[in-house]
Image (cartoon, helix red, strand yellow):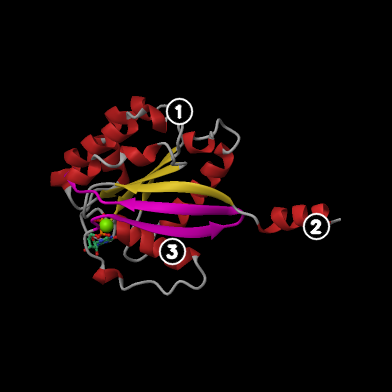
Amino acid sequence: MYTLLSGLYKYVFQKDEYCVLILGLDNAGKTTFLEQTKTKFSKNYKGMNLSKITTTVGLNIGTIDVGKARLMFWDLGGQEELQSLWDKYYAESHGIIYVIDSTDEERLSESKEAFEKMISSDVLEGVPLLVLANKQDVPNCLSVPDIKTAFSDSAPKIGKRDCLVQPCTALTGDGVNEGIEWMVKCVVRNIHRPPRQKDIT
Ligand SMILES: Nc1nc2c(ncn2[C@@H]2O[C@H](COP(=O)(O)OP(=O)(O)O)[C@@H](O)[C@H]2O)c(=O)[nH]1
Ligand SMILES: [Mg+2]
């Protein structure tokens, strides 16, 4: 009886945990996106003043529950010297969110370089990739088609993994729900695929 009840309890309450990395150049809006996500998806999260967010030096962590899935986000610093740390986290990640500052045409090629380096990692093969075209609230910013065109020669490297380019305004929350819901759908579906490295003990 106990086994039956504890099994039922686990079925109802236990969450499947997934790690999602939030990557992109510094100033792209990663931390703002994470704060907005926590505000939208955690009932009791008060949310910090988004205008007070300053440059991330270490990493920010956040957890949300969506249905039976628990997503743990790691928002890693994007400055050049910190990018070399990204791949230390790849083996443990089930999803990647790559944030692009759509207002910064000057650094688009730098962002693309970091993106290409990231998706070239074998460890990330098959890991769903959400690309956020952030700061869509700013007039005359790059549109999703503009960004897709600029990143078009990365397509072969993206290969068959799930990939969505989502317009987003982290500051107001536009596009955040759509992006997160897509990511949840993908990581949950991926559970039937071979386990990530950290799951192999
Ligand atoms: N206009 C606008 N500014 C944003 C948006 N998202 C972030 N920012 C601003 O961009 C700057 C960098 O944001 P931050 O989250 O610290 O970027 P990070 O370095 O990638 O973590 C801050 O001044 C934010 O207020 C957005 O959607 N629209
Ligand atoms: Mg940050």
Q: Secondary structure at mark 3?
A: helix
The verdict on residue 65 being magenta is yes
Up the image or down, 162 lies above or below 170; here it is above
The reply to whether residue 110 is in sight is: yes
Which residues, given as a range, are shown in magenta?
A: 56-80
Q: Number of numbered discs present? A: 3
Judge by depth and name the residue closer to the eye, 110 or 196. 196
The residue shown at (58%, 40%) is: 189
Identify the mark nearer the N-term, 3 or 1. Answer: 3
* Residue for badge 3: 38
Task: Determine the residue located farthest toward the top in the rendered image.
Answer: 156
Residue 59 is drawn in which quadrant? Answer: bottom left
- Could you say which quadrant of the image residue 109 lies in? top left
Secondary-structure class at tag 2: helix
**Disc 2: which residue:** 5
Q: Cβ–Cβ below 8 Å for labels 1 and 2?
A: no
- Name the amino acid, label 2: Leu
Question: For residue 142, which numbered disc appears in the image?
Answer: none
Give the quarter of the figure containing the N terminus. bottom right
- Callout 1: 10 Å neighbours few (<14), some, many (20+)? few
Label 3 with label 2: CB-CB less than 8 Å? no
Q: Residues within 10 Å of mark 2 (few under 14, many from 20)?
A: few
x and y percent of residue 5 in the render?
Answer: 80, 57
